[in-house]
Amino acid sequence: MTIIDARPFIAIGIAFLAALLVSMSNKYPNIRETWSAVGSITMFGVIISMVNGVLNGVTYEYTLFNLTDTIGLTMRVDPAGMIFAALASLLWIPINFYSIGYMRNNHEGMQTGYFAAFALCIGATMGIAMASNLLTFFVFYEILTISSYPLVLHERDEEALLASRKYLAYTLVSGQLFLAGTVGVYCIAGTMDFTPGGFLRIDMAPAWVLQLLFVLMIMAGSVKAAVMPLHGWLPAAMVAPTPVSALLHAVAVVKTGAFAVLRVLGFVFGPKLLSELGIADFLAWAAALTILASSFIAIRQDNLKRRLAFSTIGQLSYIVLGGALLTPLAVKGAYLHLVAHAVMKITLFMCAGCIIVRTHLHDISEMDGIGHRMPVTMGCFAIASLGIAGTPFIVGFISKWNLAMGAMQAGKPLFVAVWVASAILAMAYLMPVVRMAFFKPEPVKDPRKYGSISYCMLIPICFTAILALILGVDPEIFPPDFYKLCEMASAGITAGWGGGWGD
């Protein structure tokens, strides 16, 4: 059942209004931060108010105005969109309070522009999550690119300038690829509306044309999802403040890339057409190679944020690989991992930020014994690290289990071996940090001077670490009901097509 409801646009409007009010409060830091905090909580309230309806089969839709004579700027909240919208709006709350503490403790400049751009990024992410058609998706995809650029540039030094230019070059090109694919799809199908199971058919155009459109659109999503070899911008962007890194990795940008891949696979082409074209396997192997290669590279990184960046490159390809397998369990696992990775990786980056603020250390080789002085921070880091490796009773295990069962359902057990190898490699590049922090003594003559950090930084870390545990034990007890939403999103994409399952 479809209901005309303005709440999707209201949610986006709240974020954009918060950005405006923050910009107008430059001389009043407390008021500026209050606008940002109130905006994050209010937007989550609006999103959460639609969850029960979506769980009961309601689709919320609203058209603000027409972009062309046949296509409108339309928002539509379905289970897949609700997963991403609820996730991003939920995590904006802790990362917002964390940002307040980080920016103050680290004495960062240009905080007004930072908080305004942050709010714009979240608003654009909401638009991507709830876009009902390809053109609306593209509009917010580009807004996200432009609004996140100042965040990467935040330090305004030569390194930040080079990194931001690289980021802009990669992401703007990806947007144009997506637009080209969108125009081609519309010329063939006469529609751009996302449809569960896809709306393109094999008889609409020659196979090579459909394959070309698929490559264009998947490349566009893969750039932001940092699938190798399109990943170069992501490690470079680690020059940004740590809360920005958390935003890029857990809430926006790379997550929008993975979400774009899932939308194209499941709502434009669909499992039946992709099976007939025989092209999804190439994407699956590209994702598998990215998982393994990025994990090996992560092991070699001494800089903590760069190690986490290469971890993200591999973990995002879990989602891409799950979508490319096209089976119900694999697709459900992909959506679950969208949630799981966001919760775990935002925890890891916030922990990295606390380490930087308190110790001014960036390299892992210098972190001997820091767990004795920072037990809460490093305890949360350990929980998230175990989750990234797929340890039971932490949220990452549930998503990876479904992905592995999805590979078996597709009759492709080799991909299970890829995920197992990746889990072992994740232990190899994350757990040494925990071992050094807790099981190595501090240097006898320790030159480190430990500063103080506020509860604004510690409480968000504890919240997301506890959330990872709660969702790992029972993903149905924490609202919104991500697990059921993931099942519904998967069922909508794969219903009525069983080709190749269990072969």
Image: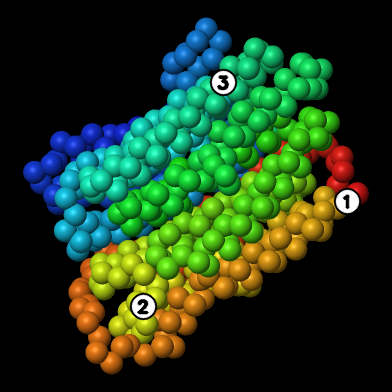
Q: Which residue is mark 3?
A: 180
* 3 and 1 marks in contact (CB < 8 Å): no
* 3 and 2 marks in contact (CB < 8 Å): no
SS at mark 2 in the image: loop
Quadrant position of residue 364: bottom left
> Residue shown at 55%/33% (left/top)?
220
Q: What residue type is disc 3 on?
A: Ala
Q: Indicate whether 234 appears above or below 130.
A: below
- N-terminal label among 3 and 1: 3
- N-terminal label among 3 and 2: 3
Q: Which residue is mark 1?
A: 502
Q: Indicate whether 404 appears above or below 252.
A: below
Residue 23 coordinates in the image, percent (x, y): 19, 37
Quadrant containing the N terminus in the rendered view: top right
Can residue 25 be seen by looking at this rendering?
Answer: yes
> Residue shown at 57%/51% (left/top)?
316
Q: Nearer the viewer, residue 328 or 144?
A: 144
Q: Which residue is mark 2?
A: 367
Task: Count all numbered tags in the image, as a single digit.
Answer: 3
Q: Residue furthest left?
A: 27
> Residue shown at 61%/28% (left/top)?
216
Q: Residue furthest top?
A: 69
Can residue 7 be seen by looking at this rendering?
Answer: no
Q: What residue type is disc 2 on?
A: Met
Q: Indicate whether 80 appears above or below 408.
A: above
Label annotation for residue 89: none
Q: Residues within 10 Å of mark 3 (few under 14, many from 20)?
A: some
Q: What residue type is disc 1 on?
A: Gly
